[in-house]
Image (spheres, rainbow, N blue to C red):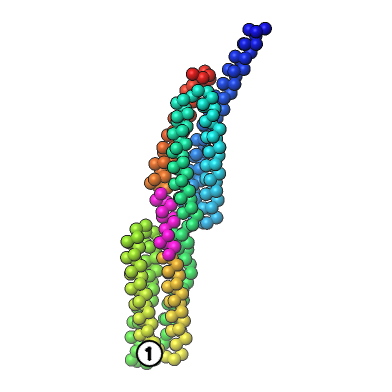
Amino acid sequence: MVVISLGAAVGCSSRSALEQQAQAQKLSSDILVQFTRATDAANRAVMADTDEASVAFAREAEQAKQAIQKDTDALKPLLQGLGYSEETRLLDQFGSRFSEYRALDRTILDLAVENTNLKAQRLSFGPAQDAADAFRDAVEAIAPLDAARDSWHVKALVATAVATVREIQVLQAPHIANADDAAMAQVEKRMAAFEAAARSALERLAPLVQPASRPRLAAATAALDRFMDLNSQIVALSRRNSNVRSLALSLNQKGKLTGACEESLRALRDALAGRGFTGTR
């Protein structure tokens, strides 16, 4: 009876070790799958073209990271119970790298969901374009006070005013795409010079237009004010550079951390697979 009992105890212990080993292998594989899911979702959040999509993908990435942490916490005592020192070391190595990854990923996702460059682009192509067109329409409808004497002068000033506003529009795109503060400052300096030229043209037009055209001149001034207000918003959003910064962090620092985490996880998975079902060492 004693021998039978001892045999049964050994058998139960062996089955328990086998079950723990199988569970450890499953958890290590799940962690790798969830890590891939987290990185893919985070990348989609950075590349998304709407606020809603960015937020949804960021949420998916966060859920995957929580699952990774849960599985990691469950795996460590299994490895320790099995006496797997090398696998425990690899899991700890992953845990350290994953902590760095999570901190950087949080920064990237916070930037991604702001979408400031995308919002600046939408303002540039939408409301700012409309304001610039309204300015053009108003100023080109102005009639000279003396057609014989002032016509050429009015046309020249109108052309200057329209061209300078268009120049500001052209500069919005490189400002939005640029990540360098000094380069953006130079673009803003050029924008300010073009604005000054546009306002100077309007001031010089004032004494040269018919009384009936004064409402059009006022409309042009209002449209220019609206355009420049929108331009200021575009510049402020562009300066925040959340999309550009999140993409740069993803491609550079995060890429290295992702590779390091995957290296630890694959080494852990392979180490567990190499043990087969031989029990503890």
Residue that badge 1 annotates: 207
- What is the span of residues highlighted in magenta in the rendered image? 236-249
Q: In this orientation, does residue 24 appear?
A: no
Q: Is residue 238 magenta?
A: yes
Residue 201 in the image, given as x and y percentages of width and height: 36, 81
Quarter of the figure with residue 244? bottom left
Vertical comparison of 120 with 164: above or below: above
Residue 246 in the image, given as x and y percentages of width and height: 43, 52
Identify the residue at horizontal 46%, vertical 79% (top origin): 222
Residue 183 in the image, given as x and y percentages of width and height: 32, 61
Q: In this orientation, does residue 274 appear?
A: yes
Identify the residue at horizontal 38%, vertical 70% (top origin): 168
Q: Nearer the viewer, residue 162 or 59?
A: 59
Residue 19 in the image, given as x and y percentages of width and height: 58, 23
The answer to whether residue 67 is left or right of residue 192 is: right
Q: Is residue 71 magenta?
A: no
